[in-house]
Amino acid sequence: MKRESTHEQTWSRRNFLKAAGCSVAALGCCGRLAVGAQEETKRRNIVFILSDDHRYDFMGFMDSAPAFLETPNLDRMARQGAHLANAFVSTSLCSPSRASILTGQYMHRHRIVDNQRPEPEGTVFFPQYLQKAGYQTAFIGKWHMGHENDDPRPGFDHWASLKGQGTYFDPTLNVNGTHQSFEGYTTDVLTGRALTWLEKGRDPDRPFFLYLSFKAVHYPFTPAPRNQGRYANDPVQRPETMANTERNYQTQPHWVRERRYSIHGVDHMETGQYDNDPVPSFDGLYRQYCETVFGLDENIGSVLDYLDQAGLRDSTCVLYMGDNGFALGEHGFYDKRDAFEESIRVPMLAYAPGLIAPDTTVTQMVQNIDIAPTVLELAGVQPPDGVMDGRSFLPLLRGQSVSWRDSILYEYYWEWNFPATPTVFALRTERYKYIFYQGVWDHDGFYDLQTDPHERHNLIRVPAYQERIAAMKKQLFDELERRGGLQIPVRRPAGERLDQRKNRR
């Protein structure tokens, strides 16, 4: 294996760029094609940045963020671009969510239902359409479809992927089919590889699409050494629903209470009794999460600074989002998967000077399935009819008045290795949420998000809401049936033949 050193653990922005091997003066070209003004707008360079397990509300500019959390670069993207304030995933789990981003499809359609099985043969990822339209494409970071499979995937001219979940330090990357080892904090390493590709690995006369996918801030939350202990003395505000009282649980489904004491429950912390994986105290876990978010923000800032100094800012659109949310004590949970707000909501920002007005706030509900059609519209590319479930939110970013969805669909299938969360189907409108739990025969969930934003009071048995509950339940199953989502796409484990299954009986 080849071993390369990336950059020092502590640096200024300018030194970071130098360490990544980026001579920004050499990149004066904006990278746009020589076409008309309208086409220039459509064919911008595009940088899509994806993080892991970043909560929607852990950005410094948000009123609900921890008072001590610093995210100056995400704040800059919101201030100088757009904040999509109601962004959601269609499945709150790494592989299914990433597949929905790359295909524009719900999980029941792309059929990537867990973190172990690879994408089905013939799966089409939206960068393949970009390649056909003349874009240069690069993927750098965490892929995590097919578990440990880090092989190059269709749609990317340049590939540098972690295997599975990857590590927080000294990662090994599959670089265009060859494994190479790198020293340093993985978030920094991935950013360095991305900036090196921007400077040395592409044709400056063609538009580009860069997909930068971080491992951060996935559990176990691990900040860069330079940020370890940054928030050690800051007070942690525990969520209201973390308290173990009847007031929090008397109307909730039984599995919600029981998960508190099982894997991914706060009363399981520090013992590791179910998975031999003890975690720090809650306050320590919380602070480490915030320190890891801060390091993520530093690296996003390095990408933005590079675009500025390379003369690429005005010809590039930068999109940022998390792959799913994450509970930090809410309802006694830490993790995701369920349909509570902390799990299904994600941060989403868009930054494109000259295209998106500063301080834009998009209030309509958007989802991860909308990323693919949005990127393609930015590039002036029209995918074949019917291949995507999502729709482009570019008109919303540009302040245009268009009709939009009034509800979103959510689905999660029970996993044998994480048994605490059942199969979940949910329908969320701007005000109400109905949740159906398959195979858990106590009761479902119904919440008024306007009067109860923390989802403390399950109204499923309140007589005054029965008509609305019945209507939302019908809408949920009508939608699933119309889209083919009532058949759970279970597939045989990779590499296992029918005769092997017979021998196991």
Image (cartoon, grey):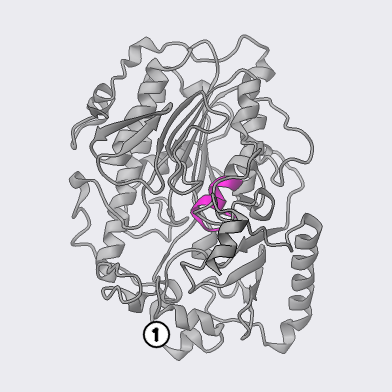
Q: Residue at x 64, y 61 (%)?
A: 410
Residue found 68% across the figure and 62% down from its top: 488
Relative to residue 309, is residue 34 drawn left or right?
Answer: right
Q: In this rendering, does residue 84 appear at all?
A: no
**In this picture, is 384 found above or below 393?**
above
The residue lying toward the viewer, choosing from 274 and 102, is 274
Q: Is residue 73 visible?
A: yes
Name the spot of residue 78 as percent of width and height, x first.
47, 42
97 shown above or below 32: below
Start and end of the magenta stretch? 88-100
Q: Which quarter of the figure is the C terminus placed in?
A: bottom right
Q: Is residue 94 magenta?
A: yes
The question of residue 116 being in magenta is answered with no
Near mark 1 (Cα within 10 A), the count class, few <14, some 14-19 or many ≥20, is: some
Which residue was labeled with disc 1?
244
Q: Is residue 246 above or below residue 182?
A: below
* Quadrant in the picture for residue 437: bottom right
| Residue type at tag 1 | Asn
Of 1 and 475, the residue lying toward us: 1
Nearer the observer, 202 or 60: 202
Instruction: Give the residue drawn at x 48%, y 12%.
Output: 204
Residue 90 lies in quadrant: bottom right
**How far across and down, in percent of the image, does residue 4 sit?**
24, 27
